[in-house]
Amino acid sequence: QSKQSNAGSVAVKRAYDYIKHGIIEFELMPGSRINEVELAAALDMSRAPVREALNRLVDGGFVTFLPGKGFFCRRLTLSDIADLYEVRFDLETAAVRKACGKHDDPAVAELANFWGSIAERQQSMAIDELIAADEEFHMRIARIAGNAEREKLLQNIYERIRFIRRINIETEPRRTEFVLEHVRLADAIRRNDPEEATATIALHLGANSRELNDDIREALARIYAEDLQ
């Protein structure tokens, strides 16, 4: 019984990761109906773990369920994504303030060292690699600040806005500015300067900026243009 249960859990995890990756990378298009039979065949498993994975993705905000119609990939609108950025801003502002109060934690020095190594080689890094490093940087701040629930919320948001964040750093001078903002943020936390830290995170996240809205519009245009090709 335990072996069967473990095998079932592994299958659900594999289905969950596979479907979520398809949604994040827009291999499954926003608003499209999800075919459970095709997914089960592609993953060489029964529909049961696929359905369980889809239910978990509903809880995570990646998938919606309509009674009598089935599962659908989340729809994307400018307003929805702007809301995610607003929540991210609130969570990260609180996190950097908390982290400043723990400036003598060894993890703060490690944060600066981690990003210092990224800054040295960022010119040779692929965008996806730099985005992964950015997520790790912000998750380190969240871990320093404490509060496991905030960490989980931020991780969920990062995954749901990853495509927009790629567009934000595709070109110079934004890419270099992006890297330097992390340097300034790590330094402000190390110096226990919450005002500088929160000002830097506001600049970094482009809170309420026209540039952010332009990035979101560009991302949506690309996503739906690909669907039309």
Image (cartoon, rainbow, N blue to C red):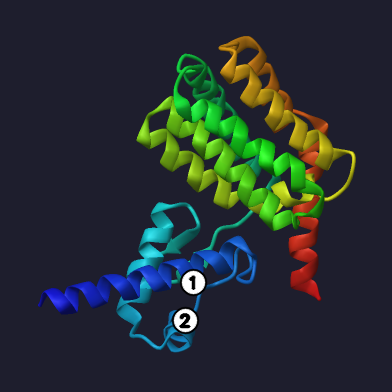
Out of 55 and 161, give the one closest to the viewer: 161
User: Badge 1, how many Cα within 10 Å: few under 14, some, many 20+?
Assistant: some
Residue depicted at x 35% and y 72%: 51
Out of 87 and 21, give the one closest to the viewer: 21
How far separated are the C-alphas under marks 2 and 1?
Answer: 9 Å
Picture coordinates of residue 204 (x, y %)? 71, 30
Picture coordinates of residue 31 (x, y %)? 60, 64
Q: In this orientation, does residue 216 appear?
A: no
In which quarter of the view is residue 191 placed?
A: top right
- Are circles 2 and 1 on residues that touch, CB within 8 Å? yes
| Residue on which disc 1 sits | 18
Amino acid, disc 1: Tyr
In which quarter of the view is residue 54 placed?
A: bottom left
Residue depicted at x 73% and y 29%: 181
Q: Which mark is residue 39?
A: 2
Picture coordinates of residue 113 (x, y %)? 61, 34
Which quadrant would the C terminus be assigned to in this image? Answer: bottom right
Amino acid, disc 2: Leu
**Side of 137 relative to 9 (left or right):** right
Out of 91 and 52, give the one closest to the viewer: 91
Which quadrant would the N terminus be assigned to in this image? Answer: bottom left
Q: Say what secondary structure mark 2 lies in.
A: helix
Residue depicted at x 82% and y 50%: 170
Q: In this orientation, does residue 192 appear?
A: yes
